[in-house]
Image (cartoon, rainbow, N blue to C red):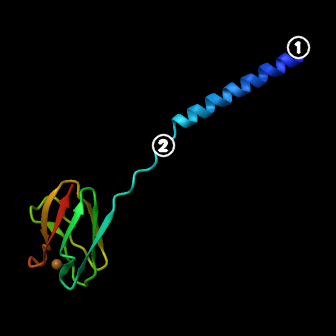
Amino acid sequence: MRRIILLMTVGAAVVVSTLIVVSVAGAHKQPTAMAKHPTRTVLIQNFSFKPAHITIKRGTKVRWINKDSAPHTATANNGRSFDSGRLGKGQRYTHTFKRTGKKPYHCEIHPDMRASVVVKR
Ligand SMILES: [Cu+2]
């Protein structure tokens, strides 16, 4: 009889500790991962940005890829929002747009190369 009581006690202890472990593990579960920021690609090709004008949602990443042999930059006209620096052939630059508004930009090396990103909410 004593042995049965002992077994039941041990059994109950195992059940209780299992419940505690499960609930603690559950509390530590991460919420489902948020969707990654979408990415838009702008090619720099034949001395122009393609597409030259894009409209994106706030939080979108824009990736410029230089397809030309000539070096180019993607530089915000205001000189500080973003600046790729000199991109050689095949090089890329990514910027995440966090603020709304129209962001005109150009190539520092070829100032005739003009384009813009419009960021919406
Ligand atoms: Cu250029």
Residue located at (71% from left, 27% from top): 15
Q: Secondary structure at mark 1?
A: helix
Q: Secondary structure at mark 2?
A: loop
Between 107 and 32, the residue placed more toward the observer is 32
Residue located at (80% from left, 21% from top): 8
Q: Quadrant of the N terminus?
A: top right
- Distance between mark 1 and mark 2 Cα atoms: 45 Å
Q: Amino acid at mark 2?
A: Gln
In the displayed structure, would residue 108 be above or below residue 3?
A: below
Within the image, what quadrant is residue 105 found in?
bottom left
Question: Position of 111 compared to 9: left or right?
Answer: left
Residue located at (30% from left, 74% from top): 91
Query: Crowding near pointer 2: few (<14 within 10 Å), some, many (20+)?
Result: few
| Ligand 1: quadrant of the figure | bottom left
Query: Crowding near pointer 1: few (<14 within 10 Å), some, many (20+)?
Result: few
* Count of numbered badges drawn on the protein: 2
Disc 1 under 8 Å from ligand 1? The reply is: no
Would you name the residue on which mark 1 appears?
Answer: 2
Q: Quadrant of the C terminus?
A: bottom left
Residue 65 marker: none
In the displayed structure, would residue 14 be above or below residue 36?
A: above
Q: Position of residue 24 (x, y in %)?
A: 56, 32
Q: Are marks 1 and 2 in contact (CB under 8 Å)?
A: no
Within the image, what quadrant is residue 3 found in?
top right
Question: Position of 26 compared to 45: left or right?
Answer: right
Q: Position of residue 64 (x, y in %)?
A: 26, 71
Between 46 and 72, the residue placed more toward the observer is 46
Which sits earlier in the primary sequence, circle 1 or circle 2?
1
In the displayed structure, would residue 92 be above or below residue 25?
A: below
Would you name the residue on which mark 2 appears?
Answer: 30
